[in-house]
Amino acid sequence: MFRKIETELKDWHRKKCRLPLILRGARQVGKSYVVQKIGNELFENTLIIDFELQPSFCQCFESLDPQKIVNRLELMTGASINEGKTLLFLDEIQQCPRAIMALRYFKEKMPALHVIAAGSLLEFVMHETDFSFPVGRVQFLYMGPLSFSEFLLNAGEKKVLDFLDNVTVEEGIPSEIHNKLLELFRLYIVIGGMPATVHTYLETHSLSESHKIQLSLLQTYQNDFGKYASKTEYKYLQLLFEKAPSLVATHFKYVNVSNEIRSRELKVALEQLSYAGLINRVFATSASGVPLFAQIKETRFKILFLDIGLLHTSHKMNISELWEKDILQIHSGRLAEQVVGQQLLTLGDFYESPQLFFWKRESKSSSAEVDYLFTSGSAIIPIEVKAGKTGRLRSLQTFMKEKQSPLGVKISMSPLLLDHSILSLPLYMIDQLPRFVSNLAF
């Protein structure tokens, strides 16, 4: 299975002045797989230390001296660790905080050794008040579920992907290709972007088998709750995890989870699910300039689930709806807002933590809201997820006028079209957004 992040890993491998890498992302998004794949392709040998399966290896990091660490690892594993030839992969590194601390010394004293670490629950260690992280001595890469373009590539649709990579607004998209891509996008929504689910479908062509994997993944995440929550917190996590799919793309209010539990307790649970990568918060911003994060309102946010396939599985949706109905009409458009947000999260730099924002102006005389914002340089591009050809775009136009935005984007099931300064982008072309913004907004 190919992942775009492989290109970044190959570039990192070639650099002379490299830092140890830490791969971040939720459990089961493919972190270990992609590191092992790169290890097999580019190195003579890969030494994998999984601290969750082999906690005894933590003893090798009692000393923070890289040479002593390497010596002990070689003695315990019988493997050779050679600079420039060996990839040292420290998996589930959150289980061994001293191994995290040791990364800075690998940079300082053994910079020629390729070291990659990964951890599904690493955020919990990083937010502990007494933990000192090796800032400036390591580099982060962020990973999530497969994007639609990654799904197409692995499904053998490279020609379709090449077409999308080169199509222009002037050329447009022939109706037969448009319809084919809409069907493929529906399939992506049903399967989702979790690697195990995608792999199972591509191997078996069975939606039933891929659905079983989705159920198993949901159970795996719930089984993890005990690793980072007390018995009291566990029930709040369980409740929020079950409620989250129905709260996606709505203004999040703790009372909608439960009116019997204090918001303080649910806030902790929400932060924990966010640390685990199971939920992404989309913050409201005044969008007065970039960076957008500088103007957020921390108490005003929406949530997105990790993956569209897991969302509808958790929500026990009827799959036939996804095949037959207008995607943008299902659950009042919240399903579409989830899948659009999930795709937008994949568009940024792999070295930056992905973050989404929306804009809302509250006024008794004139309220307005834009689903998502995309930045390109100093330009802020508003994005609306709208059903139908005649969907009103008052909020989009209000934002463009107030913020002097050079381009607005409507994402729908309609074909590719530019109408004055409004770009209508089909759902299946979200991956192409940066290219069109670059070509049309400047």
Image: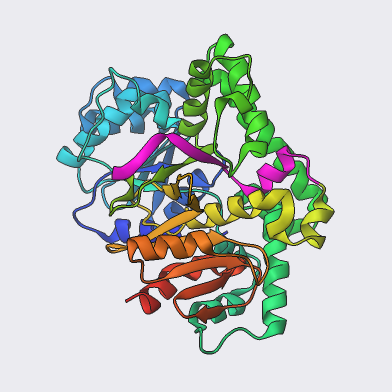
Q: Residue at x 63, y 14 (%)?
A: 260
| Residue lying at the far bottom of the rendered structure | 171
Nearer to the camera, 161 or 381: 381
| Residue lying at the far left of the rendered structure | 108
Q: Is residue 65 left or right of residue 87?
A: left
Tell me which corner region of the image, top left, top right, bottom left or bottom right, holds residue 8: bottom left
Res 52 seen here:
no
> Relative to residue 24, is residue 393 depicted above or below?
below
Res 345 seen here:
yes
Return the x and y of residue 126 as percentages of the image width and height: 34, 28
Q: Residue at x 41, y 31 (%)?
A: 122
Nearer to the camera, 16 or 71: 16
Return the x and y of residue 304 as percentages of the image width and height: 56, 43
Nearer to the camera, 261 or 61: 261
Tell me which corner region of the image, top left, top right, bottom left or bottom right, holds residue 380: bottom left
**Magenta stretch in the rendered image:** 294-317
Tell me which corner region of the image, top left, top right, bottom left or bottom right, holds residue 21: top left
Q: Quadrant of the C terminus?
A: bottom left
Q: Residue at x 50, y 59 (%)?
A: 395
Colour logic:
rainbow
Q: Is residue 67 left or right of residue 428?
A: left
Q: Residue at x 57, y 85 (%)?
A: 172
Return the x and y of residue 52 as percentages of the image width and height: 49, 26
Nearer to the camera, 98 or 286: 286
Return the x and y of residue 78 as percentages of the image width and height: 40, 34
